[in-house]
Amino acid sequence: MIETHAHLYADAFDKDRSEMMDRAIEAGVEKFYMPNIDSESIDGMLEVEDKYPTAIATMGLHPCSIKKDFQKELYQVEDWLAKRKFVAIGEIGLDFYWDTTYKEQQIEAFKIQIEWAKKYKIPIIIHCRDSFDETLELVKTNYNEDLRGVFHCFSGTAQEAKDIADLNFYIGIGGIVTFKNGGLAEHIPEIDLDNVVLETDCPYLTPTPHRGKRNEPVYLDIIAQKIADLKQMPKSDLIAKTSSNAQALFS
């Protein structure tokens, strides 16, 4: 399995990070992609990358970290992108769930980071909450053959998944697919697996039956099993397909 979205550097793992990684590897997780949040998360993320060869850092500015001084944050992202190679720019995007005070700044930061992705020819990891239509439109408007990526934490419909696939983007499916009232499970049978990758978004969005506890990559197996059951296919085939997709996404 390939874990395409895990905040392994989060404080929630400080006391048992090595044990957490061991559990995941034993469960069959072979690679971990870590999306950045902002300037405060960079050092911790790179420390994890240094310690664990299968944990891979990306670089970007999360929409929830965008305030009045977002240009200063973007400058650090740009500086890091120039200093060393990253496999993706993320996580970036739009989040209108908590607050829309900095809506225009989020849009501007998203567009700037999309241009960087095209410049470096690396994918984007998109955070999209209460903003699907706006996010999809921005991707379409700024699209060219060098732009690719993944809509992380997908919770939409089969039609929305198709709209994403039509742009040759992927959808990241995590614990929401196991939620009783999550609304995603009913659409899985109609979603084409050619554009699906697995993620946990740990330490958040813990899948059933562990909701209320800290999420971690070992639970990727639960997500894979749930999707396989909904698709009425062997879990091993589902894992092979989503891992192949993840390799294609991150080259």
Image: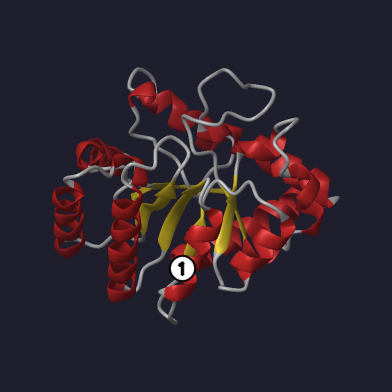
In the image, residue 21 above or below residue 34: above
Image label count: 1
Whether residue 68 is visible here, answered yes or no, is yes
Within the image, what quadrant is residue 109 found in?
bottom left
Is 92 on the left-hand or right-hand side of 47?
right
* Residue shown at 63% from the left, 30% from the top: 207
Q: Nearer the viewer, residue 188 or 131?
A: 131
SS under mark 1: helix
Q: Is residue 148 left or right of residue 164?
A: left
Instruction: Specify the color scheme.
Output: secondary structure
Identify the residue at the far front of this view: 101
Image height of 159 relative to 42, above or below: below
Indicate the amino acid at tag 1: Val
Regarding residue 58, the answer to whether it shows in the image is: no
Residue at the limit of the structure toward the right, as seen here: 232
In percent of the image, x 37 and y 53: which residue is there?
A: 92
Kindly give the residue lying farthest to the bottom in the view shown.
145
**Residue 192 as seen in the image, left or right of residue 212:** right
Which residue occupies the foreground of this view, 20 or 60? 60
For residue 242, above or below residue 9:
below
Image quarter (top left, top right, bottom left or bottom right) of the C terminus = bottom left
Which is nearer the eye, 138 or 52?
138
Residue 226, percent from left and from top: 74, 40
**Looking at the picture, does residue 243 appear above or below residue 184?**
below
Instruction: Please name the residue shown 33% across and 24% down the image.
Output: 11
The image position of residue 128, as x and y in percent, is: 49, 50
Percent across and percent down for residue 55 are 38, 45
Residue at the spot of label 1 = 139
Q: Quadrant of residue 48?
A: top left
Position of residue 59 measured from the top left corner of the image (x, y, whole percent) = 29, 53
CA neighbours of label 1 inside 10 A, class few (<14), some (14 to 19), many (20+) = many
